[in-house]
Amino acid sequence: MTLDTQARQPIDRSTCSALDAADPLAHFRERFVLPDGVVYLDGNSLGALPRATASHVARVVTEEWGQGLIRSWNDAGWFEKPLVLGDRIAPLIGGAPGEVTLGDSTSASLFQAVVAAARLRPGRRAIVAERGNFPTDLYVLESVQELLGGDAPLERRLIADDGPTLAEVLDEDVAVVVLTHVDYRTGRMHDLAEVTRQVHEAGAIVVWDLCHSVGAVPVELNAAGADFAVGCTYKYLNGGPGSPSFIWVAARHQAEARPALTGWHGHARPFAFELGYAPAEGIGRFRVGTPQLLALAGLEASLELWAEVDLEALREKSLRLTELFISLVDARLGAWDVEVVTPRQSARRGSQVSLRIGAADGYAVMQALIDGGVIGDFRAPDLVRFGFAPLYVSHADVCDAVDALEDVLASGRWREPRFARRGLVT
Ligand SMILES: *Cc1c(COP(=O)(O)O)cnc(C)c1O
């Protein structure tokens, strides 16, 4: 043991327990399966398993598939399932019924949305995105630039938190602006209403990526007058690994919007098996092919739970958790040159906190933490990331996580060679 560890006093637990005792959302924690001895702070990558999910999925498998067989397309409502569940996602993002459908990966949904958005602004030749965007968003844009560009690819203009700003790149040549509401690395949150207003002022269309927003912070798409949005359901919404992404299209755009992928489930009369494509009315045209019904079953179970959640209370708890974490980091980890990268101003913060650790290798620190049961993740090149899913993370978890982090740093345990080995997924 080093002198540091001997001198270390664990965090006083009374504050955390008092906050947990007063937490109006505390009861949701029992609705999730959480392994013993684990503090789970990675619900922003893969949400925890709701207790109700396993039996619901089993029922869909054994009854709807096993017994119902092909009849379940009608009898169990399989055909309409992406729209029915889409309507349950709508209130979580400030959308209306008939504005959301489900069924691909976020990457594919983003492709659908950006192509449809760009086609609403023919003649404009630039797309604006963010340097800090989740890479898949930028990769997808590359093919959109090529596909819609004609003789030469559409121009891509990148903004960043340290400039250029949106105002600097917006002009009458910009067709679409594609932004992630809450930055996956830093947790920085855009002002959705203000940015939407700015984009519209330039006559462009905005596509929001809500992967780190839905189920984490209240989102008000219609109040902001937004155009398109996409997002994951396996992060804060707890739909399970590989649960389908959603796409939201403002009702006012639906009649005119032409999806990139014109598949039979988006056809006006899919079972007429006509020769040509005719788009379905409304959001249904953004469906592509056969929905992933087993994956949707996992999501269906978690959305039952989400229907009970007060999103304002969710946000209040999220801010309490992240503020507590930041204040404990400030108070205890200064010796290791730990920088809080996430904005301290609550209006600019999602539900995660990312740290840069000057005096240690962040990747190895996270591996050592995971080894000790505190699960967060690492985002290259140097960010140690902690997600606070308000439905099942407690204030005691926050105290335990900071204690564990201080212990890993003070003991130097992160230096063990096994913690430097990189897995395929970080
Ligand atoms: C997680 C995430 C994705 C994931 O895309 P998939 O195609 O569902 O794998 C996309 N964008 C952002 C901003 C994300 O955080």
Image (cartoon, rainbow, N blue to C red):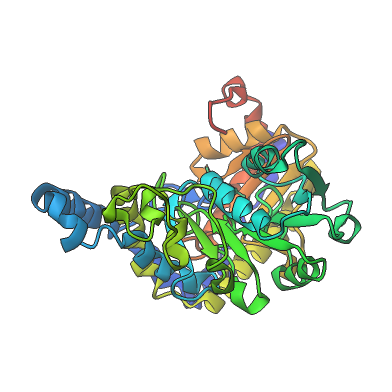
Q: Is residue 103 above or below residue 20?
A: above
Q: Quadrant of residue 79?
A: bottom left
Residue 146 in view (yes/no) = yes
Horizontal side of 385 relative to 203 (left or right) equals left
Q: Nearer the viewer, residue 156 or 255?
A: 255
The C terminus lies in which quarter of the figure?
Answer: top right
Residue 220 in view (yes/no) = no
Horizontal side of 31 relative to 346 (left or right) equals left
The N terminus lies in which quarter of the figure?
Answer: top right
Give me the residue at 69% from left, 53% from top. Answer: 183
How many numbered marks, from 0 up? 0
Q: Is residue 417 above or below residue 306?
A: above
Q: Position of residue 410 (x, y in %)?
A: 69, 39
Q: Quadrant of residue 416?
A: top right
Residue extending farthest to the front is: 275
Q: Position of residue 238 (x, y in %)?
A: 42, 56
Q: Is residue 144 above or below residue 206?
A: above
Give me the residue at 75% from left, 56% from top. Answer: 175
Give me the residue at 54% from left, 56% from top. Answer: 231
Q: Position of residue 393 (x, y in %)?
A: 49, 60
Residue extending farthest to the left is: 67
Q: Position of residue 247 (x, y in %)?
A: 51, 59
